[in-house]
Amino acid sequence: MADPTFGKDFEAASAGEGIVLLRKARKGEKPRLGGEFFKPLRQKVEAVFNTLKNTALAVEPHGAHTLEGLATRVTTTILALTAAIWHNERRGAPPDAH
């Protein structure tokens, strides 16, 4: 899935590797398959990215010395946030409860 601003060269190179790039239609293009799903999905993806970027994830001061260490820290942070969301849903807390 990509932003429509990705160039035609990138899309062609992706297709050459067998990757189907899903994106919203550019101005003047015919509607593309699945285009009606992009607005709500993009909002959710951006909300998740903002949560990760602006809260516990904070990749800059991660303190990892290797790529594996960074991957471990990022993975455990996402797992912890997922567990908190799951717990709140199980107890019936509203989605915006912290």
Image (cartoon, rainbow, N blue to C red):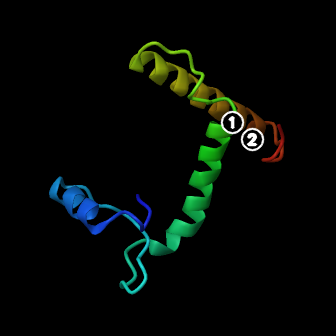
Residue at x-position 56% and y-position 23%? 76
Up the image or down, 48 lies above or below 73; here it is below
- Residue 87 vs residue 69: left or right? right
Q: Are marks 1 and 2 in contact (CB under 8 Å)?
A: yes
Task: Give coordinates of residue 43: x percent, y percent.
Answer: 61, 60
**Circle on res. 89:** 2
Task: Give coordinates of residue 69: x percent, y percent.
Answer: 46, 16
Neighbor class of circle 2 (other Cα within 10 Å; few <14, some 14-19, many 20+) is: few
Instruction: Say which amino acid is labelled 2.
Output: Glu
Q: Quadrant of the N terminus?
A: bottom left
* The image quarter in which residue 40 lies: bottom right
Please tell me how many numbered marks the rendered image carries: 2
Residue at x-position 39% and y-position 87%? 28
* The image quarter in which residue 34 lies: bottom left
Residue toward you, 60 or 86: 60
| Most distant residue in the front direction | 60
Residue toward you, 39 or 67: 67
Up the image or down, 66 lies above or below 13; here it is above
**Circle on res. 86:** 1
Task: Give coordinates of residue 12: x percent, y percent.
Answer: 21, 64
